[in-house]
Image (cartoon, grey):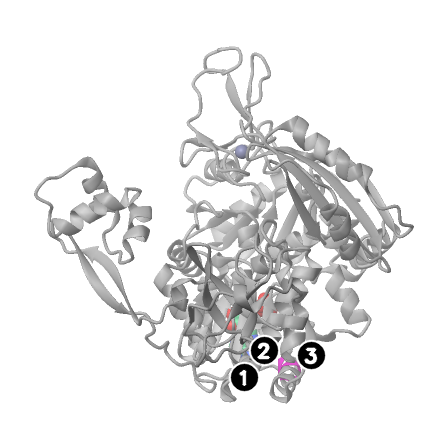
Amino acid sequence: MPAKRVRLLMMNAALGPLDYRVPDGVEVNAGAVVVVPLGPRQVLGIVWEEDRLPAERIDDSRLRPLIGVCDVPPIKAELRRLIEWCADYYCAPMASVARMVIASSAALRGAATMTEYRLTGGMPERMTAKREQALAALEGEQASLRELAGMADVSEAVLRGLVNQGALEPVEVDCDRPYPQARADYAVPELSPEQAEVAARLVAATSGGGFAPFLLDGVTGSGKTETYCEAIASALERGQQVLVLLPEIALTEAFLRRFEERFGAAPVQWHSSLKATERRRAWRAIAAGTAQVVVGARSALFLPYARLGLIVVDEAHEISFKQDDGVRYNARDVAVMRARFERIPVVLASATPALESLAMADSGVYERLVLPSRFGGAQLPDIQLVDLTEEPPERGEWIAPPLRRALLQRLEKGEQSLLFLNRRGYAPLTLCRDCGHRLQCPHCSAWMVEHRFSARLACHHCGHEMPPPKACPECGAADSLVPCGPGVERIADEVAQILPDARVTVATSDTLNSPERAAQFVAEAEHGAIDVIVGTQLVTKGFHFPELTLVGVIDADLGLEGGDLRAAERTYQQIAQVAGRAGRGAKPGEVLIQTRHPDAPVIAALAAGDRDAFYEAETEARRHAHAPPFGRWAAIIISSEDEAEARMAANRIGDTRPRLPDLQFYGPAPAPMALLRGRYRFRLLVNARRTAQLQHTIRQWIAAVQHPPGVRVGIDIDPYNFV
Ligand code: ADP
Ligand code: ZN
């Protein structure tokens, strides 16, 4: 009798599919997660359908047996199809996609308890600097030794010393304790008639089941959240799971609170800063079907939900749904595919939808649901342009007289203002007054950005940091380095000069870098403890501060520069979103947009509040450029630590490009970020007509070219930027 065998998708991208023998008496089905021997090691695989994963047939006698089957539900067929689709569409190894599914190795272990450590309050007999550092940093924390070592920035050995000395104690934690249950009928809001109509449609689709993509197109403050929560309630009533994707962890905090007010219990969170125990607990509850509603960043999309009934992508236009390393996927698009495989509804919610999403709605593929007005009669804000060429700010300042006057008025009336500038830090560039030298990152083609709060210069691309030098590193002149241009910290300084009594808060990913800090910011802003918020794109969306009546855009032209493929659309979205923070309560809002190009179509459309005009103009520009949704882009990025090697590899790829009528090639050329994290980068762009077999062509072409081991070739399908 032939041996019973299984085909495995191995969780290591360097391995192809492999066959293993199933020992007698062991039962495995497709999707099972198994442990197998590989040489002297034990590795993970997922049992796959043989006909979907071709492999070289090896003889029965050479088959090695499975070691074990993990104590988790098998990965369902719907999710296996999604893994295949993602790998195929994004030209990525299936293993890399599957690793996003098996996102917690701890979850695969059956044991139900884990050991964490916490401070006892006792002191070690012998104190060292490292021990002291650990004791100070770990106050109130409880986690694994490895995680604590990371938090305290000491080695695990230091912590083991503290365990031996009785200053840290082990705690057994039940890894799989259940989450509090949400209740569909906990606090049901009264919907406005237009909200009720939209909610009814979503509820019908959710209870009916079946693939149903929606574009929930509602102005800022229209109550999109309240409305899709009715569909969540409907899923809860039928014991189905719901996934809500948010673009930013900073937004999760506000969502958690609103969710708890509506459903009586917080949803389950999923994001990159979860501890290993929290990941395991969430993963297992998701796979078991006991996690009812999961709110998370884009990676939550690949988890093995047992009974998914609805997916919501909130702020669906956001660029952060696009992942730019590893598997370069767009979570918004993958969400729609997942809903399709699972045969469930998916809701893309936005006040400023991506042009691609609008096109899908216009062509009837997505059902469009519209919330045209703000909830509770709040009016959309009045938008005015400030022409910087006519009313410039003082030299060395960035706030022009009209915005200055408006800020003063708000403070007098005790109302809040928000200034938006999408630049972290104090100044984007530091240069020497004597010799003109510009401080650049040694590892990237980027300037070092001054951060005054932390008294550091930082590279925003690789994280390289240094203290600000006292003298110019090029000519040696002392005190000759001057900041050029504004970042939010510098704007905050300027506000402090205009309004010495105002309470000013800078809100960026530097200052709101944890859920706790984000929560504190929201609480202070809501309770009127802040007069002026100066923030980056982080504050443009989601927040609802009723006392906020003035929004000032410091530099509307900023986003129109640079390698963003959708620069005009992004500028429109950012400014429309940040404008949407004004006047959400009873008092009307005012928006002042500072610009040097008041006639640019995107700026004019913003001023006129004419969204349709903007989208029409942008649609024509895209059609003309064969850009999405009329054509498609792919980027191929070739990099190496050796510049000559990278250039040669790029040329080899360029020379062998396929000559097809429906593909157009640009490059290879040095990428705008020609050096990134110490790697030299070259780039080729492919523009394809809709008819082209883009992925298939690229895969074959790239696979046929050999490179030295130091060369990496990345493929970015539907890229968001050209850098
Ligand atoms: P959007 O996401 O569309 O910008 P939100 O969902 O944040 O809007 O709603 C704006 C504000 O109006 C929130 O404070 C929300 O609680 C409130 N709101 C919206 N709809 C209702 C409703 N039906 N009942 C009570 N409050 C509502
Ligand atoms: Zn750098």
Category of crowding for the residue at label 2, using alpha-carbon neighbours closer than 10 angstroms: few (below 14), some (14–19), many (at least 20): many
- The response on whether ligand 1 sits within 8 Å of label 3 is no
Along the line of sight, which residue is nearer the eye, 415 or 115? Answer: 115
Residue type pointed to by label 1: Ala
- The response on whether ligand 1 sits within 8 Å of label 2 is no
Q: Is residue 65 magenta?
A: no
Tell me the quarter of the picture where residue 89 sits. Answer: bottom right
Q: CA distance from mark 2 to mark 1?
A: 7 Å
What residue does disc 1 label? 235
What residue does disc 3 label? 212
Along the line of sight, which residue is nearer the eye, 58 or 17? Answer: 58
Residue 574 lies, in percent from the top left, at 64, 53
Element marked by disc 3: strand
Residue 290 lies, in percent from the top left, at 43, 80
What residue does disc 2 label? 310
Residue at horizontal 67%, vertical 70%? 52
Left or right: 101 as drawn, with respect to 579: left
In the rendered image, is residue 94 in sight? yes
Category of crowding for the residue at label 1, using alpha-carbon neighbours closer than 10 angstroms: few (below 14), some (14–19), many (at least 20): many
Residue type pointed to by label 3: Ala
Rendered-image quadrant of the C terminus: top right
Q: Is residue 483 above or below residue 558?
A: above
Residue at horizontal 61%, vertical 28%? 642
- Figure quadrant, ligand 1: bottom right
